[in-house]
Structures are given as structure tokens and as C-alpha cells.
Image: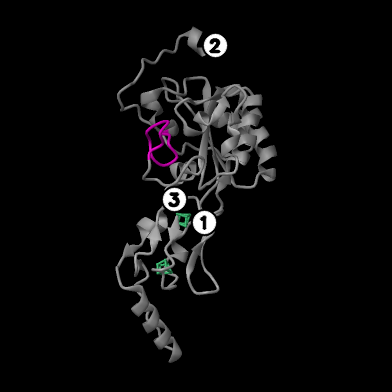
């Protein structure tokens, strides 16, 4: 994202709108964007209404009023001169927008936002089968963000633990080889608002995975949230809660898919599939 200095009048309305704190007013009184901190989420561009006031008269009036301790301040949700100008992005910077702008679908999955339905649609997709645990490891949040070099450290650790990465997930699409979890190096320097690593493993491995992430998390330059899911058996029970409680976590069912969707593939609970 860029700000057209010829148009900016330095009202600072845009600064609090940015979820990464990337917009500041420079020493000359113009809004500037810290390109390294900007994740190309377009919140500033979309979030402010635009008025097309002429910049020079607005600046003149602001200075004149400032001289007598008064000021002309536009409504807080307005960029009075329409000074924002989206960049023509090229690879690998395009990835910032793909992961950070909720209105842009990921090319790999055609889904917007973080680009995955996670386990929320498991009643339809059957990604996580009985006896399996699905993990969503979310890295980064607004105000913090995450670089892909940090994501790579987590995906490699998970690969070492033997997880299977979800194919319909944009982070998996950035791996050179999902067997070793290595993210392609040309995106290491790209920062995004947040991203979700999705994987699954047998339920008995849940303690190992949680332990490994807990050990790694303090050394990561971001924040980590984890969601674990499983498929209930025919009577509605699941062994996951007990596993988590044994590990000392307060476990409760945060979301339940009621199975009212249309199955995309037949669900089989044969002994062969469970093994
Ligand atoms: S809202 Fe527009 S005019 Fe005001 S400081 Fe930001 S870019 Fe400049
Ligand atoms: S595109 Fe997003 S991160 Fe970049 S300056 Fe605008 S609001 Fe901030």
C-alpha cells in the first residue's frame, strides 16, 4: 500500500485503522507506511470512506486554523483527499495480501481469509476421521503478524512428529515437500497478519504434538494458538476431551458440527480405515 504525498493532508485518520501499526505521520506532516510492517491487508484502503477534497486548500486551512489553536479535522472514518493508492504487487509480496486481506481468495484453495474451512466443515469433508486428531496451529494475530521463516520452523517440527498436512490449505501449498514440512525459501521474508497450519495424526499422538509446540512456542517471534478436533463416534462420544484433561487442559467442545451438511465422500468406519 502506498500513500500519495501530493494528496495527503496529514490528518492522521488512517493511523489507528491499520491493524499492524504500519502508518505513521512523518516529520513533514505526511502519512507514511512502513513497508516492512505492512501486510497489504487493504484495511486502510477499504476501511476509510473517501472524500475528494482538494489537498492544497485543506492544508492551507489546517495551517491557518492551527495558528489560532483551532483545527479542521475530517470525520474520523474519512480520508478527506483519497490519498491511498494500492501497489501493483509482485511475487513474493503478493503472498502478504493473499493471507491478510479477507476479501481475496487464495489461488490454491479458492477460499478467502486464511484460505481454509478447517475442521468447521468436517461433517461434509470428513478430513478428520474417527480415531484421528486434527490440529490447527494459528500463527500471528493483528498487531503481531508472522514471517514465513517462523512458520517454516513449526511446519518442520510437525513433519518430524509424523503429521499429515492438509492438502486443501494454503500453507501446505507453500511447502516444497509436505513430507518434510519445508516452506519455500523465497517467501521466508514475507510477513502476514496470520496463517493456519492444518494437519492430522492418530489420537494417541496428541500429547506429543502439543508438547512439541509448547516447547517451540517461546522461541517463535509471534503468538501461537492451537485448536484440536476429532470426529465423535456414533453415540456422540470422543476420547479427545479425556486426553486433553489428562494433560491438564480445561477441555470443552468449542464447536460441534451436527452432520447436517451433505457428505462429500462416504464415511466408513471399517477396521481397515481405523488402523
Ligand atoms: S487519512 Fe488520508 S489525508 Fe489523512 S493522513 Fe491518512 S492518508 Fe493523509
Ligand atoms: S494495507 Fe493493511 S497493513 Fe498496510 S498500511 Fe494499510 S492497513 Fe496497514
Q: Is residue 128 above or below residue 32?
A: above
Give the label on residue 275, or none: 2
Label 1 CB-ligand 2 distance < 8 A: yes
Q: Is residue 64 above or below residue 17?
A: below
Mark 3 — residue?
41
Q: Position of residue 45 (x, y in %)?
A: 38, 57
Residue depicted at x 51% and y 56%: 20
Residue depicted at x 47% and y 20%: 129
Front residue of this view, candidates 121 and 184: 184
Mark 2 vs mark 1, foreground winner is: 1
Q: Is residue 115 magenta?
A: yes
Mark 1 — residue?
20
Q: Is residue 144 above or below residue 152?
A: below
Q: Is residue 22 magenta?
A: no
Label 3 CB-ligand 2 distance < 8 A: yes
Lower position in the chain sequence, tag 2 or tag 3:
3
The residue range painted magenta reads 105-117
Q: How many marks?
A: 3
Label 2 CB-ligand 2 distance < 8 A: no
Amino acid at each position: 500500500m502506498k500513500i500519495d504525498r501530493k494528496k495527503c493532508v496529514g490528518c492522521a485518520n488512517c493511523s489507528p485503522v491499520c491493524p499492524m501499526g504500519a502508518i505513521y505521520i512523518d516529520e513533514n506532516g505526511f502519512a507514511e507506511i512502513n513497508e516492512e510492517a505492512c501486510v497489504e491487508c487493504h484495511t486502510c484502503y477499504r476501511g476509510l470512506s473517501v472524500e475528494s477534497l482538494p489537498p492544497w486548500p485543506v492544508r492551507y486551512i489546517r495551517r491557518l486554523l492551527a495558528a489560532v489553536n483551532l483545527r479542521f479535522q475530517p470525520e474520523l472514518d474519512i480520508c478527506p483527499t483519497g490519498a491511498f493508492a494500492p501497489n501493483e504487487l509482485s511475487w513474493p509480496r503478493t503472498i502478504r495480501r493473499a493471507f491478510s486481506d479477507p476479501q481475496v481468495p487464495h489461488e490454491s484453495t479458492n477460499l478467502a481469509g486464511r484460505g481454509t474451512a478447517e475442521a468447521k466443515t468436517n461433517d461434509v469433508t470428513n478430513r478428520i476421521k474417527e480415531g484421528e486428531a486434527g490440529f490447527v496451529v494459528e500463527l500471528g494475530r493483528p498487531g503481531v503478524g508472522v514471517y514465513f521463516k517462523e512458520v517454516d520452523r513449526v511446519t518442520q517440527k510437525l513433519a518430524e512428529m509424523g503429521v499429515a498436512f492438509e492438502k486443501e490449505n494454503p500453507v501446505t501449498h507453500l511447502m516444497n515437500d509436505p513430507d518434510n514440512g519445508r516452506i519455500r525459501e523465497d517467501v521466508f521474508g514475507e510477513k502476514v497478519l496470520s496463517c493456519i497450519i492444518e494437519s492430522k495424526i492418530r489420537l494417541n499422538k496428541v500429547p506429543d504434538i502439543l508438547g512439541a509446540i509448547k516447547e517451540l512456542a517461546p522461541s517463535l517471534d509471534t503468538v501461537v494458538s492451537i485448536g484440536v478436533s476429532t470426529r465423535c463416534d456414533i453415540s456422540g462420544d470422543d476420547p479427545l476431551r479425556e486426553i486433553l484433561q489428562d494433560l491438564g487442559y480445561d477441555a470443552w467442545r468449542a464447536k460441534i458440527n451436527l452432520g447436517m451438511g451433505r457428505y462429500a465422500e462416504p464415511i466408513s468406519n471399517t477396521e481397515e480405515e481405523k488402523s
